[in-house]
Image: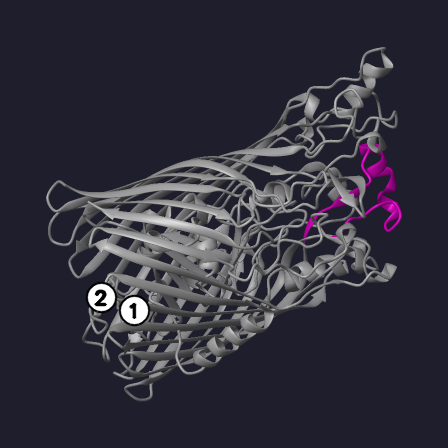
């Protein structure tokens, strides 16, 4: 079996050096954009391209690298049921990790571009800023210390396409656009369609159901309203060893989503447009298992769980997003006024648990040793309201044409933490009396953690795109932004392209960027229990400006600053073959990271403060490092007739290497740099995702039949351990792994298709490690492509 597998992979890699990849992806500046597989490959569709404010710009004339990913076919036939995992297997520069054993990070998939943090990628919906989540990724999260955007709050059936701008764009769009920008374009087409999906892992668990429907109807005078309704039911999976109390695998998820998207023309190019989406999702993940008598009375009660127990961290997620705007003509100018609002809330309930201090107090008083088995643990919310006013005009009389755009933005944000019920965090029997405080698995947020903080920002920009000649294009932008909590910043960008021949173009860009510290990073506060080498330890994550942070001399958070450089070449020798290659470098200074854990041993001055709080360790968010990211994006696509059918081939590759170039400790922490950024924390930053990812795909269609085959290669990763190399424990090395997916589709007619497929055909899993040294306490973490193994799926699509 291994020999056959290697032979197949070598043959496919060899084919990939000649031709390269997929009907799903069209690359800007290279291939025509089509949303319908039956359209001619030579037809060009004019679209609004992220990174350009030129009205009616086409995907073939922007000087920046933009991936145009049509989701029509994926929504009908794809093997992944959510947006984050779908893009994970389509876009090489995009990474999303479905995690396990990382508490709240299990409930919301984090996503990022080019190996940077999830909060360094800006997400737009129909060109308007989308809000981030209220969650801060902690513990073993791949995007540790980051907030991000919950892409899975948007149903795939509602999406027409996703554009990924692989370039820094803070001067054009503001904060967060250091690694790039994703613009999710929603459908506004007439007609109705529905899909029912089912999947499960080969071992029989993780059963998932996905009924989803879209219907576009006409409104008013040539207006349209697109309505999408979706229900997602994903079953829990478990890869724990037999006899192990742990539950290791996919989080259980149930959720309902509704999205409305439309526009109403008002004559002469004027129109009112709107988007409204809401999702309610319940998710449940498993914490570490507590043993039986070994954990009595500190973490367990013999009267409740004599054989041990697994606490479940249950999250109730509410996400709301809405935009209303009006676009109109002012003579030769196009004006656009819009209001966008986003809200994300995550509330926790911990079940199958206990507060050991309550149980121990009951036992000492002559009772059985009983505690409540579930607790409301509190939670947090984040809201963002953004007002935009933009103006744009194209002047044809200057050089070969120039597009001039300017505008302003006002944004207000709010972050709240709500306390849980007292039983979720109190120490009922007193500090040091045997029973540990709080609900096991996830202690609730305390009254001292409560916060309700807001800020606002105002920005102005100028964006100019100039056609110097038919061959030479230049794009410039400058943006000034002021935040009420940390001050002002100014960013700029210069980009250009030169058409050497009809088939060859050079392109490049220079830009500066920034990312404002999120309110979540500034004000998050929590006391939690972590397991270090199998030993439970209470840890406080102290808010910026709080007692512990001030005692440690942690300064006020400020913005991250970046410098982006890129240079690339595109080759299009024919309408059926295209290649792009872009090298880039991103330097980030004053990057905000989650510090290592300080305690009375490695920082004695904090000992008294930590002791008074009854915790063993403390962490902080701090502007403490500079990083350098260098990489290469390579894409190639080819279409050809093969026999009586058509073959599409695609190759996409991203190599990205991030290095910490400097650790900048505040004056009070100098000499403690190895604690401020421990080896383990450094590796989270440098190798939280694989440095290399490549996708090679083949799609063949003939008559009513269509087949798809993809190979996905993930490079090696090295992650830290709890003990560390200083204690003689080697880092966790995850060898390169290659997976493959396949599917077969039969079209009964133009309105009905059935797809059957297999993901991870060869049942590939990460390299095994010492469970006592991994973040999730299992023999491997959720790296590369997860840990569940082979999955089968089916999709039935109908149009009516």
**Number of other residues with Cα within 10 Å of mark 2, as a class: few under 14, some 14 to 19, many 20 or more:** few
In percent of the image, x 32 and y 58: which residue is there? Answer: 745
Q: In which quarter of the image is the C terminus?
A: top left
Q: In which quarter of the image is the N terminus?
A: bottom right
Q: In this view, does 576 lie to the left or right of 634?
A: left
Question: In the orientation shown, which residue stands out farthest toward the front?
Answer: 1
**Number of other residues with Cα within 10 Å of mark 1, as a class: few under 14, some 14 to 19, many 20 or more:** many
Q: State the residue position of label 1.
A: 59
Indicate whether residue 603 is drawn in magenta. yes
Q: Count numbered badges in the picture.
A: 2
Of residue 6 and residue 611, the one placed in the foreground of this image is 6
Question: In the orientation shown, which residue stands out farthest toward the top?
Answer: 366
* Position of residue 473 measured from the top left corner of the image (x, y, whole percent): 32, 78
In the displayed structure, 323 sits above or below 592; it is above
Please say which color scheme the image uses.
one colour
Q: State the residue position of label 2.
A: 45
In percent of the image, x 18 and y 55: which residue is there? Answer: 330
Helix, strand or loop status at disc 2: loop
In the displayed structure, 554 sits above or below 736; it is above
Q: Is residue 322 visible?
A: no
Q: Is residue 495 left or right of residue 306?
A: left
Helix, strand or loop status at disc 1: loop
Indicate whether residue 577 is drawn in magenta. no
3D distance between C-alphas at marks 1 and 2: 8 Å
Q: In this view, does 464 lie to the left or right of 313?
A: left
Query: Could you tell which of marks 1 and 2 lies nearer the N-terminus?
Result: 2
Of residue 116 and residue 298, the one placed in the foreground of this image is 298
* Position of residue 186 measured from the top left corner of the image (x, y, whole percent): 31, 50
* Position of residue 218 measured from the top left corner of the image (x, y, whole percent): 15, 43
Dots 1, 2 in contact, CB < 8 A: yes
Write the start and end of the magenta stretch as one range: 596-622
Of residue 274 and residue 233, the one placed in the foreground of this image is 233
């Amino acid at each position: 079996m291994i020999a056959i597998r290697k032979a197949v992979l070598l043959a496919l890699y060899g084919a990939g050096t000649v031709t390269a990849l997929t009907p799903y992806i069209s690359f800007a500046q290279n291939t025509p954009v089509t949303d319908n597989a039956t359209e001619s490959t030579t037809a060009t569709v004019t679209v609004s391209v992220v990174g350009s404010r030129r009205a009616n710009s086409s995907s073939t004339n922007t000087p920046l690298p933009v991936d145009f990913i049509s989701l029509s076919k994926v929504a009908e036939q794809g093997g992944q049921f959510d947006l984050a995992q779908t893009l994970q297997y389509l876009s090489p520069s995009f990474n999303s990790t479905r995690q396990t054993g990382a508490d709240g990070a299990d409930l919301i998939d984090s996503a990022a571009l080019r190996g940077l943090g999830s909060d360094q990628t800006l997400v737009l919906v129909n060109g308007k800023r989308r809000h981030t989540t209220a969650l801060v990724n902690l513990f073993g999260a791949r995007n540790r210390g980051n907030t991000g955007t919950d892409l899975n709050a948007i149903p795939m059936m509602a999406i027409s396409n996703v554009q990924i701008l692989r370039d820094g764009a803070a001067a054009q769009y503001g904060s967060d656009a250091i690694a790039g920008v994703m613009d999710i374009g929603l459908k506004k087409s007439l007609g109705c369609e529905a899909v029912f999906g089912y999947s499960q892992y080969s071992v029989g668990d993780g059963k998932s159901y996905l009924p989803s429907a879209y219907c576009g109807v006409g409104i008013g005078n040539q207006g349209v309203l697109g309505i999408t309704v979706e229900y997602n039911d994903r079953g829990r999976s478990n890869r724990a060893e037999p006899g192990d109390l742990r539950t290791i695998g996919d989080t259980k998820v149930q959720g309902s989503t509704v999205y409305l998207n439309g526009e109403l023309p008002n004559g002469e190019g004027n129109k009112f447009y709107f988007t409204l989406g809401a999702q309610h999702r319940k998710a449940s993940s498993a914490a570490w298992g507590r043993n039986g008598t070994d954990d009595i009375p500190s973490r367990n009660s013999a009267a409740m769980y004599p054989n041990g127990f697994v606490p479940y961290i249950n999250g109730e997620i509410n996400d709301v997003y809405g935009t209303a705007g009006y676009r109109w003509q002012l003579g030769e100018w196009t004006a656009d006024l819009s209001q966008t609002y986003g809200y994300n809330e995550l509330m926790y309930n911990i079940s199958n648990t206990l507060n050991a201090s309550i149980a121990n107090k009951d036992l000492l008083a002559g009772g059985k040793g009983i505690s409540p088995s579930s607790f409301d643990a509190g939670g947090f919310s984040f809201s963002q309201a953004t007002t935009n006013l933009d103006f744009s005009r194209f002047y044809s009389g200057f050089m070969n044409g120039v597009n001039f755009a300017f505008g302003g933005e006002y944004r207000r944000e709010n972050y709240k933490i709500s306390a849980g019920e007292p039983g979720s965090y109190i120490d009922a029997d007193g500090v040091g009396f045997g029973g540990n405080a709080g609900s096991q698995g996830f202690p609730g947020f305390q009254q001292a953690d409560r916060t309700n903080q807001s800020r606002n920002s105002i920005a102005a920009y100028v964006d100019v795109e100039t056609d110097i000649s038919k061959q030479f294009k230049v794009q410039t932008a400058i943006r000034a932004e002021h935040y009420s909590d940390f001050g002002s910043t100014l960013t700029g960008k210069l980009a250009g392209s030169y058409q050497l021949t009809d088939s060859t173009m050079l392109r490049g860009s220079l830009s500066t960027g920034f990312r404002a510290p999120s309110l979540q990073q500034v004000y998050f506060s929590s006391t939690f229990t972590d397991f270090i080498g199998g030993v439970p330890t209470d840890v406080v994550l102290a808010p910026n400006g709080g007692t512990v942070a001030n005692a440690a001399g942690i300064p006020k958070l400020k913005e991250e600053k970046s410098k982006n450089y890129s240079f690339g070449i595109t080759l299009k020798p024919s309408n059926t073959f295209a290649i792009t290659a872009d090298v880039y470098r991103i330097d980030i200074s004053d990057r905000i990271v989650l510090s290592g854990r300080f305690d009375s041993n490695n920082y004695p001055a904090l000992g008294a403060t930590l002791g008074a709080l009854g915790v063993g360790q403390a962490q902080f968010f701090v502007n403490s490092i500079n990083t350098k990211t260098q990489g290469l994006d390579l894409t190639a696509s080819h279409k050809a007739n093969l026999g009586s059918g058509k073959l599409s081939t695609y190759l996409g590759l991203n190599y990205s290497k991030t290095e910490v170039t400097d650790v900048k400790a505040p004056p009070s922490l100098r000499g403690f740099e190895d604690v401020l950024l421990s080896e383990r924390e450094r590796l989270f930053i440098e190798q939280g995702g694989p440095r290399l990812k490549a996708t090679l795909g083949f799609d063949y269609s003939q008559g009513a039949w269509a087949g798809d085959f993809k190979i996905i290669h993930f490079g090696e990763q090295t992650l830290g351990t709890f003990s560390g190399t200083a204690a003689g424990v080697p880092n966790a090395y995850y060898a390169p792994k290659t997976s493959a997916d396949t599917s077969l589709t039969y079209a009964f007619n133009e309105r009905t298709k059935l797809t059957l497929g297999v993901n991870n055909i060869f049942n590939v899993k990460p390299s095994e490690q010492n469970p006592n040294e991994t973040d999730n306490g299992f023999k491997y973490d959720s790296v590369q492509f997860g840990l569940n193994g082979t999955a089968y799926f089916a999709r039935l699509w109908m149009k009516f």
